[in-house]
Each structure stands twice: as structure tokens, then as C-alpha cells.
Image (spheres, rainbow, N blue to C red):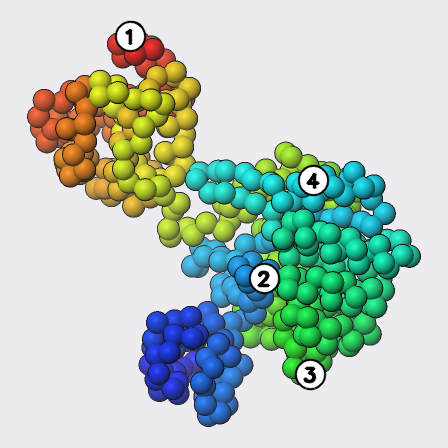
Amino acid sequence: MALTGLQIQKLLPATNCKECGSNTCLAFAMKLAGKKTELSQCPYASEEAKRVLGAASEPPVRCIELGPDRKLKLGGEVVLYRHEKTFVNQTALALNINDTDTPKAIEETLQTTADYLLERVGEKLRLDMVAVTQKDTDSKAFIELAAKAWNRTKRPLVLRSPDAGAIASAAVAVKGSRSVLCAPSPEAAAHLWRVAKENDHALCLTAPDLNQLVALTASIKAQGFNNLLLQFSSSSLAEQFQTNTIARRAALKDDFKALGYPTLRFVETGNLLDDTIEATNEIAKYGGVCVLPRYETAQMASLMTLRLNIYTDPQKPIQVEPKVYPIGDPKPDSPVFVTTNFSLTYFIVSGEIENCGVSAWLVVPDCEGMSVLTAWAAGKFSGARIAKFIKEIGFDRQVTRRDLVIPGYVAQISGELEENLPGWKVMVGPQEAADLESFVKSRLNPELR
């Protein structure tokens, strides 16, 4: 039977030292009970605690931390479906470079990895890793390329080569990057786990089939190394989908430790559409690291957006800070619009106002990240609440214009809003943000355009 947080706390040292990352031993115990951390994070755990808790306190899918600052986290999940709670550590996206690529192609890929930035609903999305693959027989060139990739991007690497010796040398060359070494075979893994441990890297294991991979994982773990990733051998998209699902279900539902690790997948079908489909499968079905063969702008934007959607907490919508946002260069007599602080709503509305060619104020009260209709139905976007927000921040003293445009879907709050904001005139705007431009042209004063 699983222990509760209070039962686990009794086995902890009760020092509240905070060295585990939690403020108190009770907070750490609650994390252990929820399988959100491991007992090894407590430096003062007694032998009894290790014996009683031990593996039982580990998350069903081990959390692997990459990068010198350990900020890139893989695995660590505790639910099979995101609506049960949420997914936490998103699939890492990486670009691959080969040692046989032209210098120009290598330079472009490294530059893209370092500079890529996609902003969406206030979130800044970046590439996480770069993979270095040896295809030539010159191990020296592979090692030098690995060092160059690390120095240029400062991203953790995925090192892949059929030569275990070349991987070992590259691991030393990029020590401090906390990267992933890909063992080309079970035999190579027996040597490379020591290299990974000595140089503070993670190790990706592979085998001809799932049964052999399970045996290999158990063997490496038994020897004292547990920073592992799994690379499944599959011959089709359907098989990869099925294997990913089997592994995650076994780890979460059956507490099968040998499959409780993040995965790594090299996407290399040779076709852009098929690559995109495979990468989509990895993001949607529990992938840990997904390595793409090259950079494609439209593909990357689509995958980044999909990943953001899947790894957004369904119980905690993305939201912007409640405040008044200036659109353009508004003056005290500029028009005033209002919307909710759900990020997607805010960015759509603010973008459409900007497209209208007017400078305006956009009032965004705290609606707990809900959309317009949802916030109104929940009583979070009422006339009284909007008026209270405007008064509390003193916005009514900053403007001379007393026209306030509300979304057309909540026209019914106009009377209540005017009652709570004496002297203001409430204008009912369009239901859809896309119609704001025609609304501005037909309803607002011509001198504002």
C-alpha cells in the first residue's frame, strides 16, 4: 500500500535543510508521496528510509535533467492522459547535423539552433538540443564537430556514432554539457555507461526488440547507473505508436521500472510530410527527445505550436498579467477596449486593434485565464468586476475619453458596467475580433483613424 505524505515525513530527518529543493521535510514528503521526486534528493536520508521508501518513491517515469544548468527536463510524468492532471516535461526538439554535411550546412544548422525563437500567446519557444551524427570514418572530425556544436549553441547534445570509442572521446570533449550518449548496441552500452557516469552525461540504450531492451536497462541500472533514455527499434509509424504507448502504460499502470525512462527518436524518413507525421506522433505519444533531420520553418512552427498545446496545463490556462496595455501610442483621449486575460484572447484582440491603425488602451482584468464567454458564465467578467478593476488601478484618472468598448458576446453587461462607472459610455463591440477593423471605421470617431 502506498504511504501518505505524513507517513513518509516520519522517515525523513526533520531538518528542513532545503537542500532537496523543498522548503520543509513535509513538503518533500508530499512530493515523494505524489512520485514527483526521488529519495536520493535528500542528502540526510537514513538507511531505514532508503530501505522502506527506496524505489517506491521514484516517479514511474524517471526525470532526466540535461544541460549544464539541468533546466531541460525529460520524463518525470505521473499520468497517462493530460486531462487526468497535466503533462509536465515537454518533448525536446533537436536538429541533426552529420559530420559529412558541408561546412555551410553545419553552420546554418548551428546558427538556427542557437537563434530560433517563436513567440506564441506570450510564450517564447526555442529549440532544445542539437544532435551530432558520425557518418564518416574520421572519428576526429566527429569529435571536433561535437565540441563545435556545444560551444556554438550551448545546448545539450545527442551524440550518435557506430563507434563507441568515438562517442567516448566526444563525451570527454563536451564534458559539462550534460548531454546524451547514444549506445549503438547493447555491447557498447556495457562500456559507455561508465563513460556517461564519469563525464556527467545521460545514456540512451537500444536493442533489437523490447525484451532485450528491458534486460539491458535492468542490467545497467543494477550496476549503479540510472540516467537512461530508451530508443525503440520499430519498422513503422504504427509500431512506434504502439511501443511508445506500451512502455508508458507499463511504467505508469504496472510500475514497470525497466521501461520507466524518457525515449529518444531520430526522425529520418526522407520525406518532409512523413517526418512531420512521425514527429507529431512523438510529441503526442510520450516522446522524450525528437531529433529532426533538418530545419523547415513551417514544420517547426507547427510542431512547436502542437507541443505548446499538449503541454499546457488544462486546469490552468495560459494567461497574461491583468493590467491596462497600451496598443500603439495612446493618449488620454484614445479609445478604450476591454477583454479577458486569457492569453490567446488577449493576443488576438490586441493584434486586431493594432491592425486597425489606431492607438488605444486595452483593459485586461483578472479573469483567471478564462475566455470571454467562459469568464462571463463563471461570474469573472461582469460589469461590476470590470468597473472595480478600473477604479482600483486608477485608470479612470489617466484618461479623458469615457467610451469603453466591450466584446459583443457579453452585451448584457453593458448596463451594469455603466451603473458602476458613472460618466462612462459603454459601446458594444463585435462578437469576433476579426470584425474590429470595420467596427472602428464605422463607430469610432474618424479623427482616431
Question: Badge 4 is on which residue?
Answer: 295
- Amino acid type, residue under disc 2 in the picture: Pro
335 displayed left or right of 449: left
Mark 2 / mark 4, whichever is N-terminal:
2
Task: State the image quarter where residue 331 is shown.
Answer: top left
Residue 426 point in image, percent of width and height: 18, 22
Which residue occupies the extreme bottom position in the image? Answer: 48
Q: Answer yes or no: do the residues labelled 1 and 2 have beta carbons within 8 Å?
A: no
Q: Residue at x 54, y 54 (%)?
A: 90
Disc 2 vs disc 3: which is toward the camera? 2
Q: CA distance from mark 3 to mark 1?
A: 76 Å
Question: Badge 2 is on which residue?
Answer: 68
Q: CA distance from mark 2 to mark 4?
A: 25 Å
Q: Residue at x 11, y 28 (%)?
A: 421
Foreground residue, 177 or 338?
177
Question: Crowding near pointer 2: few (<14 within 10 Å), some, many (20+)?
Answer: some
- Amino acid type, residue under disc 3 in the picture: Gln
Disc 1 vs disc 2: which is toward the camera? 2
Mark 1 / mark 4, whichever is N-terminal:
4
SS at badge 4? loop
Q: Answer yes or no: do the residues labelled 2 and 4 have beta carbons within 8 Å?
A: no
Residue 422 point in image, percent of width and height: 8, 26
Whether residue 73 is visible to the viewer of this picture, yes or no, is no
Mark 2 / mark 3, whichever is N-terminal:
2
Question: Badge 1 is on which residue?
Answer: 447
Q: Residue at x 91, y 57 (%)?
A: 137
Q: Quadrant location of the C terminus? A: top left
Mark 3 / mark 1, whichever is N-terminal:
3
Whether residue 392 is visible to the viewer of this picture, yes or no, is yes
Question: Badge 3 is on which residue?
Answer: 223
Question: Crowding near pointer 1: few (<14 within 10 Å), some, many (20+)?
Answer: few
Question: Crowding near pointer 4: few (<14 within 10 Å), some, many (20+)?
Answer: some
